[in-house]
């Protein structure tokens, strides 16, 4: 678990998208983000105060989070200087980069010398049990996507926020590095050894109060030829009562795979349901969440209505319409 | 890749089952097994010559394979003495134990000093790419099980043997530690990081001659709440043209999970086929392989006939009847 709150390091992010991890923290856990630190040339701006390491620590910051993607697979010297200063000043570091902070000798040495923690959240260090399939108390919701990157994390976070606003007991359970950095805990499920996928998810979303909801972050797609194994282990481990189909309607093919068309929404539901019912016979779809970002208002409204009519399920865009109508159905 | 042939170390195996890895090598790659080495109290016997390390090396042995399961999660001192002698004499070591040979300091030090290799085949050391889903030339067959440990490896090996006997180009592709030790190569797929399951299988069964068959070892079951993710990644990566359903008819529940009944054979086919067709639209079931070991002759014959009538597919027991009728259909 990461120590909160954070100073968000944006580096020299060339656009807002490069800083999407930091933006996610800012959007979903604003209390965790005391300030941002930007280097020369940084174009991203979270709209929170720019701070030095010392200023952020005076505001309580305990971890510097690398909220920006690195380019070219290496961590720039300029970044390392700043990260080392944060360690020296008394902060831990956290990142979800492919390369590990712990593999940078200066950072590893400094952290060891000072007793600071380096959190490479993409690389699990905990050992997980093999899945048991045993029924757990409490309720769980899992977004299931037609593809990768179609709004599953956003949907789960939006439902958590809506449930909490209604006074429900609800916790987002992160399964990817962005989600882990946002909430400060979770498991990067695609980095777990494959024998333990569902066991890791069982650990992540353990037995809870009967009226407590876990909003488990979805990953991948059953129709993605590279990642479907992760998706299925996640479905089995989540033991979801409620499934939400997530879809991006303008995408023509699976992410990074031009020869693989995005599957029909109904086909994904039909494929996912028997799998979900293996570990929870009550599993059912409770709504559809569409990412209509690239559609104009009229087209978005039309797509949502057509989808709702087709499946008879509350169909929302978490950004345009909110997820209230899905949550209504879970009361 | 392991250096062949082997001296098979049986330790103090308390029964034949404890030495099933060695028995598998003896059965399927007899040319790899120049001899066996048994300690006092060993009950297993492969029916091949007992040899000292030196005698086996005189016959060409290059690797000592631990062909026996260890008990209690540690490698006994008595074993370590023998394994160290093999290293000193000039052999590599290979094992598929949960604990690694490389984690035994005496073995690690001796191997490093002498330049020998320690193969812990349950623990992949190679990095694999993310799956591409790109169509590969050559033909592939994958056994798909109703449960774990119901005959998938045996079926694939039997089909390889039958095809080779007919002069076909055919290679068994091992995905588990026993299979790897039998053939000397492969990938322990359940130990791969989950993002790379299908990519590892794509690497294991690469593009080949149009008339070449890969017999890919199956793992787990789509109905197993702990391991289904591995199974699905394997189905996608194998890109099988031909699927064989494997079943053990007297088992009442999934292995180690009393609350999970063994699924109906037809349900497993129905679930597996759309997944297999994602990466190979031509995928279809070509037969059923039943492990009738616990049935008497009449009951076995009846079960095979009923299954054949139900699905209209050649239904065999690889041990009782051989797999010839399945291979006939692939000509």
Image (cartoon, coloured by chain):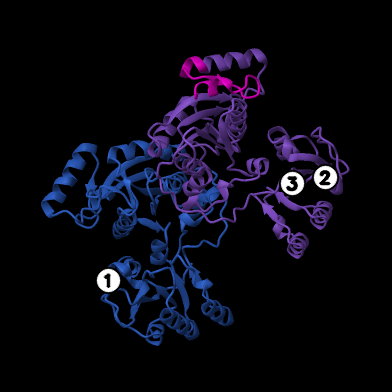
Chain colours: A blue, B purple
Residue B54, position in %: x, y? 86, 49
Q: Vertical placement of B129 versus B174: above or below? A: below
Is residue B195 depicted above or below B140 in this figure?
below
Q: Does the stretch in magenta take in B61?
A: no
Res. A86 visible in picture: yes
Judging from the image, mark 2 belongs to the subunit labelled: B
Please tell me in which quadrant of the rendered image residue A46 appears.
bottom left
Residue drawn at (54%, 50%) of the image: A196
Disc 1 with disc 3 on a shared chain = no
Residue denoted by label 1: A15
Span colored in magenta: B308-331
Tell me the SS state at disc 1: loop
Question: Which residue is found at the position 34% from the left and 56% from the top?
Answer: A153
Label 1: chain letter: A
Instruction: Write down the residue under mark 2.
Output: B56
Quarter-wise, where is residue A175 in the image?
Answer: bottom left
Where residue B271 appears, x then y in whole percent?
A: 43, 32
Of tags 1 and 2, the one toward the viewer is 2
Distance in Å between CA atoms under marks 1 and 2: 66 Å
The answer to which of A218 and B244 lies nearer the viewer is: B244
Q: Is residue A155 above or below residue B216?
A: below
Camera-nearest residue between A204 and B322: B322
Tell me the SS state at disc 2. Answer: helix
Does residue B199 appear left or right of residue A169 in this picture? Answer: right
Locate residue A27: give its quadrant: bottom left
Gap in Å between the C-alphas at discs 1 and 3?
Answer: 55 Å
Numbered tag placed on residue B65 in the rendering: 3
The secondary element bearing badge 3 is classed as strand
């Amino acid at each position: 678990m990461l120590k909160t709150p954070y100073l968000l390091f944006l580096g020299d992010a060339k656009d807002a998208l490069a800083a999407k991890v930091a933006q996610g923290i800012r959007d979903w856990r604003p209390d965790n983000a005391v300030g941002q630190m930007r280097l020369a040339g940084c174009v991203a701006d979270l709209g929170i105060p720019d701070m030095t390491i010392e200023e952020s620590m005076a505001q309580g910051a305990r971890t510097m989070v690398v909220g920006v993607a690195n380019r070219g697979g290496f961590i720039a010297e300029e970044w390392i200087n700043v990260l080392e200063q944060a360690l020296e000043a008394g902060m831990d570091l956290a990142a979800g980069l492919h390369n590990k902070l712990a593999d940078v000798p200066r950072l590893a040495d400094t952290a060891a010398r000072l007793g600071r923690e380096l959190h490479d959240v993409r690389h699990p260090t905990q050992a997980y049990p093999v899945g048991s399939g045993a029924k757990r108390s409490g309720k769980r919701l899992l977004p299931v996507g037609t593809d990768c990157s179609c709004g599953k994390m956003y949907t789960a976070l939006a439902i958590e926020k809506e449930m909490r606003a209604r006074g429900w007991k609800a916790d987002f359970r992160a399964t990817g590095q962005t989600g882990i950095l946002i909430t400060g805990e979770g498991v990067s499920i695609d980095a777990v050894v494959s024998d333990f996928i569902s066991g890791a998810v069982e650990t992540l979303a353990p037995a809870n109060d009967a009226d407590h909801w876990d909003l488990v972050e979805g990953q991948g797609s059953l129709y993605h030829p590279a990642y479907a194994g992760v998706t299925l282990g996640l479905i089995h481990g989540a033991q979801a009562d409620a499934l939400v189909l997530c879809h991006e309607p303008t995408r023509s093919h699976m992410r990074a795979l031009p020869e693989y068309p995005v599957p029909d929404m109904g086909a994904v539901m039909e494929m996912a349901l028997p799998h979900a019912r293996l570990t929870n016979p009550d599993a059912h779809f409770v709504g559809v969440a569409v990412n209509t970002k690239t559609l104009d208002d009229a087209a978005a409204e039309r797509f949502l209505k057509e989808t709702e009519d087709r499946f008879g399920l509350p169909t929302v865009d978490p950004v345009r319409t909110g997820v209230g109508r899905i949550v209504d159905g879970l009361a």
